[in-house]
Amino acid sequence: MNPLAGQLNESIKAGNSHVYDMLSTLGKEIYFPKEGILSQSAEASAHAKKYNATIGIATENGIPMHLNVIQDKLSAFQPKDLYSYAPPAGKPELRTVWRSKMLQENPSLQDKSFGNPVVTNALTHGLSIIADLFVDEGDAVIYPDKNWENYELTFGIRRHGETVNYPLFTQEMTFNSAGLREALLAQKDKGKAIVLLNFPNNPTGYTPGIKEGDEIVAVIKEAAEAGINVVVVTDDAYFGLFFEDSLKESLFGKLAGLHPRILAVKVDGATKEEFVWGFRVGFITFASENSDVIAALENKAIGIIRATISSGSHPSQTFILEALKAPEFAAQKEEKFQIMKGRANAVKAILNNDKYNEVWGYYPFNSGYFMCLKLKTVTAEALRTHLIHEYGVGTIALGEHDLRIAFSCIEEEYLEDLFRLIYQGIQDLQSI
């Protein structure tokens, strides 16, 4: 093992030995080189005032070399903020601004110890880093039956984690904390579990209420007290898009520092929150009562970034940073939030039509981009195929009877027609 990795491991052991036990083999072996091209380049940037022949970019007239056919389109930005490499951990100012945003939007974090967000290539990359750091073959990865299919690829296929699902909803259509509890406590013999919490949920658009959130936190604490090391990941991809009376904060705040056997990790990003999906800017943040543990985990995360993508997109980070600092940012974001809320409310009003009750129900939704129909008379795949070929309507079939509708990408004035066509498609299939 590299001595630098050994030093990081010793720091984690000294700060919280349970966190060390959570690490995968790769997580224990990975590190970010203190001595190497990047560190030597950083030293040269600070002290080589005559000639700096260390940087792996081309320069011209003292700035990064560039093509005017690109710069002319981006003339509002300085070349230094576009063309050179961003640091592997991300632009320092962006990390600071995003951390301040987290504190503002999550008051429960005010007195908690957590690190500086590390910039990732959006949320999928952040989840992949977590999988690399903490999942070995056979480790239990717990998440509900209504989930984003990429979890299976990221934690199951890539890292050979053992997927453990539980029903998302109870019979009363509230969050199934008892199911989560059962899945977690079943890992007592293994002594370790990775829990994924995704609210607003993809695909259902559901966010638990405050009482349900407290139940989730209590279940995770109970597992820790039973001797299970729990890496609990809040996948906050759609954070902030809360349209009704539900949790308005990430559970990361309540989980941070909750128990020595609980490691809270937050994955979020600008992609959905700021409506910049193609910019691919996300963040991963670790919480721990021990600052050395945080520093070591960040170093290991940056090591994985260095070993895979080297660093994230510099232009995208610059665009996000400038947007977050803009005086108009809050008002413009609120405008888009109201549009999304209007679409969600319109869907609920449409679904109140009694004629639909005979062919579908729907899962609770109060947030995010999506809602899910629970079909009663036809299969989801048959309906999806029929709709796309006969009516030009695209939907997502999930399992036998669930059909996901992304109201986020349908103008409010067209939503009624959308559900009319879905209903007509069901009528067609029933008559065959």
Image: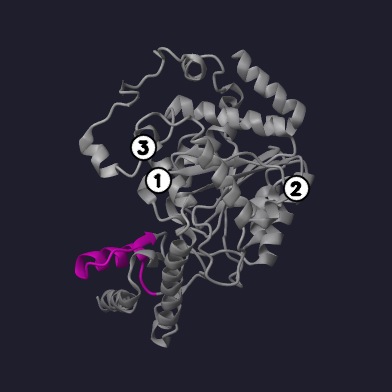
Residue at x 35%, y 23% (from the top left corner)? 62
Report the residue marked by disc 2: 258
Asked whether the residues under the numbered discs 3 and 2 touch, taking CB atoms below 8 Å apart as contact, a structural biologist would say: no
Foreground disc of the pair 1, 3: 3
Asked if the stretch drawn in magenta spans residue 386, the answer is yes
- Residue 72: quarter of image: top left
Q: Residue 319 has which mark? A: 1
Q: Secondary structure at mark 3?
A: loop
Rendered location of residue 133, percent (x, y): 57, 32
Q: Secondary structure at mark 2?
A: loop
Q: Is residue 313 visible?
A: no
CA gap, disc 2 and disc 1? 35 Å
Relative side of 3 to 40, left or right: right
Rendered location of residue 97, percent (x, y): 55, 45
Q: Looking at numbered disc 3 in the image, what kind of residue is underneath it?
A: Gln
Q: Looking at numbered disc 1 in the image, what kind of residue is underneath it?
A: Phe
Q: Residue furthest right?
A: 225
CA gap, disc 1 and disc 3? 11 Å
Residue at x 29%, y 63% (from the top left corner)? 394
Q: Indicate whether 418 appears above or below 258.
A: below
Residue at x 36%, y 65% (from the top left corner)? 380
Q: Magenta residues?
A: 377-397
Q: Is residue 28 visible?
A: yes
Q: Secondary structure at mark 1?
A: helix
Seen from the viewer's position, the closer of residues 418 and 301 is 301
Seen from the viewer's position, the closer of residues 95 and 6 is 95
Report the residue marked by disc 3: 78
